[in-house]
Amino acid sequence: MATDFWASSHYKRWIVDRATLKESRSDDLQYVDDPEYLDFFAIFFANVITKLGKKLNFRQRVIATAIVFFRRFYIKNSYCETDPFIVIAACCYVAGKAEESPVHIKNMVAEARLFFSQQPYGVKYFPSDNSKLAEMEFYLVADLECDLTVFHPYRTLLSLCKKESSNDLQTEAGEVGVGVDDGPRYWGSGDGQLELPDDAFQLAWSIVNDTYRSDLCLLYPPHLLAITALYLAVVLHGPTRELLQQQSHSVEATPVHNSPRRSSRQNSSTSSSHSKKHSQDFVAFFAELNISMPLVATIAQEIISLYTLWERYLEDSDHVDSARGTFYGHASAQTQPTASHSGVSTPVENLDDAQRPHGATPTFLLQVLTRMRENRLSDMAHASSGRHVAVNKMLERTQAAG
């Protein structure tokens, strides 16, 4: 991809404000007891897309694109009026095409049908007819306004950390600041790059992965998410944080005195060795970025809030690609319910609303989704209920056919 992010449809049409997101959930809010359930839905459906994408052998970028398509679709639609599982399959199908990793529609239907039929989802009504997915693809692309170009924070992260290989020089111009000759790069001079240890870089990468469990990809440009992930990684990664503290102490303790006059050769060698010692000045790196650091701090707080909510989401799943453990250690693994290979639900999942802990499980969220859709259909059948009903005709035909 070599388009300019600032001239792209991603920047012009798909970076929205919170008022737009709140309005997009107005119908769903009528059918949930707690608005927080919708935040849990964001985590739940992102996890579903991630798991399905891994079964399809998608790269992380393709999975991220599918999640973005899913988020964009539900800016214009409601959970209570649609079947999110057919939408998920369509998002993965279209994302594979958009990211040049296509999957045959027969394989997509077969994998999705098998995956969704398993616990905890237990979806028995997923259509086996390929034409149903093809029809949903048409409606999805229409609601996306044919804007299938998605920019992600990963390339920015690679560029800022000197992780770009020589064979991968065709970067997303405008997003990462490489290949843009007219205008300054967003990080300032473009000379400053971090040389993070591999585990610190992996932590930043995992934080970027985790941002797709929320609506941050709709609220902020991807380069800001990448820089915020680096900011959090520097603070949270133990050895890097210790190095940052040592640099801070050394600057405070360095005495200021007049040095004897030396030759120009000695001065140049001394300055070069001095620059090498201080090549990892993290504070200077972030200070020289041509961005708003208060905005980065705001995004960091939102990511921390995401982890706080995610800690209350109880699901037995693989979190190797997540940075949750860095925030909460192994406490979450001890509190999460476990499920046997037979797919039997845990006692927590069988609780009703009055007995539920302050959290959510996939089974509980599926029950909430089912009640939402049933109540919505009931209101549509009995317009005298007083609730305003706006029917999407295309999606109504899809649901009737599925």
Image: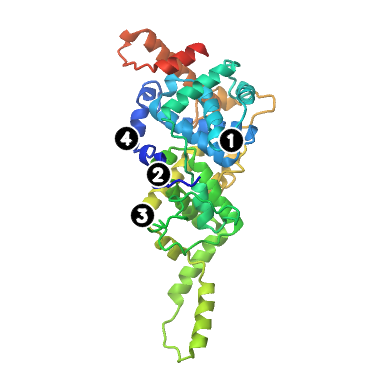
Crowd around label 2: few <14 · some 14–19 · many ≥20 (10 Å): some
Q: Secondary structure at mark 3?
A: loop
Q: How is the image coloured?
A: rainbow
Instruction: State the separation of the CA atoms marked 3 and 1.
Output: 38 Å
Query: Vertical placement of 294 versus 320: above or below?
Result: below
- Quickly name the residue at label 4: 19
Which label number is shown at residue 220?
A: 2
Could you say where residue 130 lies in the image, as x and y percent from the top left? 59, 18
Residue found at x 40% / y 52%: 296
Instruction: State the separation of the CA atoms marked 3 and 4.
Output: 22 Å
Q: Earlier in the sequence, mark 2 or mark 4?
A: 4
Q: Earlier in the sequence, mark 3 or mark 4?
A: 4
Instruction: State the separation of the CA atoms marked 2 and 1.
Output: 31 Å
- Quickly name the residue at label 3: 292
- Quickly name the residue at label 1: 336
Q: Nearer the viewer, residue 268 or 23?
A: 268
Q: Amino acid at mark 2?
A: Tyr
